[in-house]
Amino acid sequence: MGRQPGRRDLRLVARPAAVRFGLLLLLLAGFGLLLLVGPRPDPSALPQLADGLGRLAPFAAVLGGALLLVALVPRTFITLAAGAVFGPLAGAGYALGAALLAAAIGFAVGRLLGRDFVAERVRGRLARLDRWFTRQSVLGVITVRLLPISGFGLVSYGYGTTGARLLPFLTGSVLASVPTAFGYAAIGAAVTSPGGINWFAATPAALGFIASAILIARWWHAERRRRPAPT
């Protein structure tokens, strides 16, 4: 009788992969619903909030920004707010810290809840795509991050479900966030301290187009190498 509860605990830990994947989908759906119906923060109240926190304001900015990114809040809003409160340089630094922490959290959750389900069911082209993610270097992560395909948090969850390695993913995520961090932080700072907007803010769009071309070219060449030669 004493051993029976332990066995039940093991069964709870070893939940089927489909159940854990369902929990991941429910989590993402809940975040999406919260974005639609949740209250909108007042940007004008952020400077007063930061002043009230004093020296803890940078830590609160990084942690709060990371939690918002995990909850699928667009990174553009968080970076603009950081720039408006802390200025272009400090705001960009705190936004990058939040992006790094959020990428690690999203990756860990995706790996825990979704990796087994994906690994058991991918076949054919999807299996090759999963192996491509597994082999990806920092440059590959940067390329995917710069594509305008989905939000920062959603990409983090998705990467966790693949065979991608953690360190290249985190490194590529931060490097890909640098142009937009400085660009949008400068815009946020210019809103509170008007003095003109640097054209460097347009860099992310150009980088996104370049990254799209690189990714498509790499995928096309990889597919051509895998096709059997005509006889």
Image (tube, grey):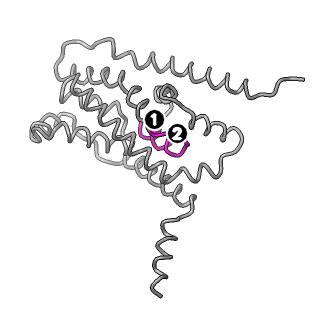
Mark 1 belongs to which amino acid? Phe
Using a 10 Å C-alpha cutoff, classify the residue at mark 2 as few (fewer than 14 neighbours), some (14 to 19) or many (20 or more). many
Q: Is residue 95 or residue 35 the one in the foreground?
A: 95
- Residue at (45%, 18%) from the top-left corner? 207
- Residue at (27%, 21%) from the top-left corner? 187
Q: Is residue 146 or residue 108 the one in the foreground?
A: 108
**Magenta span dominant secondary structure:** helix
Element assignment for label 1: helix
Mark 2 belongs to which amino acid? Ala
Answer with the quarter of the image where residue 83 lies.
Answer: top left
Residue 161 in the magenta stretch? The answer is yes
* Earlier sequence position, callout 1 versus callout 2: 2
Q: Badge 2 is on which residue?
A: 164
Query: Where's residue 116, x and y in %?
Result: 57, 53
Image mark for residue 169? 1
Please state if 222 lies on the left or on the right of 1 as rendered.
Answer: right
Answer with the quarter of the image where residue 177 lies.
Answer: top left
- Residue at (32%, 20%) from the top-left corner? 183
Image mark for residue 35? none
Given contact means CB atoms under 8 Å apart, are the residues at marks 1 and 2 in contact?
yes
Which residues fall within the magenta stretch? 152-166
Please state if 136 lies on the left or on the right of 81 as rendered.
Answer: right
Above or below 122: residue 180: above
